[in-house]
Image (tube, helix red, strand yellow):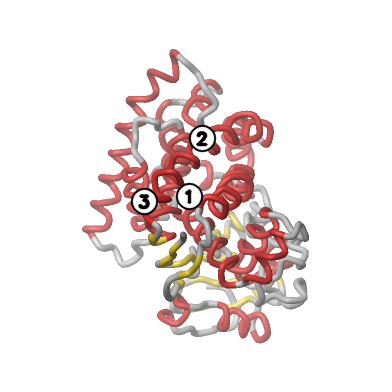
Amino acid sequence: MSTAPVFSIDPRAFWHDPYPTLKQMRAQAPIAYVPELGATLMVKRDDIAVNEKLIEVFSSVQPDGLMTQLMGQNMMRKDGRDHRAERKAIFPAISPKTVKQVWRAAFDEMADLVLEDLAPLKQADMTSDIARRLAGEALCLVTGLTNMDWQTMDRVSQGLVDGCANYAGDPAIEAHCRDCVETIDRHVSERLQANREQPDHSLLSVQYQAGMSDRQNGINIRLAISGGQNETRDAIAGTIWALLAHPNQRARVEQGQATWLDAFEEYARWMSPIGMSPRRVAQAYEFGGVRFEPEDRVFLMFGSGNRDEGIFPNPDRYDLSQDTTPAISFGAGPHFCAGAWISRCLIAEVVLPKLFVRFENLRLAGEVPFGGWAFRGPLSMPVRWD
């Protein structure tokens, strides 16, 4: 265990709202061992940005971790040359050029169909009925699993997420996760032959074209599904909530003083849909007066770094005039989120402007509870429109 000071938390309160506790940690113990989480937390922005790059110390390789055991060793659980090779293989599917020339038009068409279908309802839950569907439909396109419907995509993604967080070892959760892996693999197998005969820009296809084995191709598709559904859903619903709950900030966009991208980036900083990234200490290391030992578990708290008072002038406010350049919403090192360009396109260029036009007088219709600290978003979000 590291020599960091011990800082105890209330896990239930931390799940409902981690920010007061994280603020206290930044002031009192910016590197601290939290026994309730069994990990040493790093909570200041600059500390995270510096140390995330030190892959020889803070390694993503976690052979005994639940993600590796249940999903296989994907590119997220590799470092150095192995990680770079697989990241290079997927780049043609997620590059800014491909996003602009391929995915933008595909997202436009998909979103128009979804919003046209939902518009007559006049009311819905933004999280479960709208954002979940948009995220699932987009993920089917990008992965290449066009033989999977969005409901199945959502189900298997949640099953993977639950399995990778099953630290209590619930056998039912593990069994469901393994069933979701089998479902994904079956859809991958069905689509691989078509991709061989007719290549496209999907992740499944570009990985095959790069010479990746069918097995590793499938493992990385599992990764894309585990990380591309819930976070996208939460970012879509959360950004819309932020704009509805802060009409003065929405007015800045409508008046041309800010962009939809500003709205999304500021939300991602302020509420951090991805709030944490785990690391395994690979070698003895000292930083900030703390001694880390091999096999220590460290959590890099992106959500805390994004509210660092030493970096952001209004850390606890949703403020579109704030400079989000220092934010680490998508990471800060070699594991910078590979789907960042796709997320920005889908949410800021397509969903936000289309939805606010198509759903006239969109408004909140009830309380919007939030939950989570490793991943955070609105649990439900009733809305109405004319």
Q: CA distance from mark 3 to mark 2?
A: 28 Å
Type of residue at label 2? Answer: Glu
Q: Of marks 3 and 2, which one's residue comes earlier in the chain?
A: 2
Q: Of marks 3 and 1, which one's residue comes earlier in the chain?
A: 3
User: Does the image show residue 338?
Assistant: no
Q: CA distance from mark 3 to mark 1?
A: 9 Å
> Furthest-front residue in view?
386
Task: Answer left or right for 375 relative to 281.
Answer: left
Q: Of marks 2 and 1, which one's residue comes earlier in the chain?
A: 2
Disc marking residue 160:
3
Q: Label 2's element?
A: helix
Q: Are marks 2 and 1 in contact (CB under 8 Å)?
A: no
Q: Residue at x 42, y 55 (%)?
A: 65
Q: Residue at x 43, y 76 (%)?
A: 367
Q: Residue at x 45, y 49 (%)?
A: 229
Q: Residue at x 40, y 80 (%)?
A: 12
Task: Answer left or right for 334 relative to 197.
Answer: right
Residue bearing mark 2? 109
Type of residue at label 1? Answer: Gly
Q: Label 3's element?
A: helix
Q: CA distance from mark 2 to mark 1?
A: 23 Å
Residue bearing mark 1? 227
Q: Is residue 62 above or below residue 272?
A: above
Q: Is residue 198 above or below residue 135?
A: above
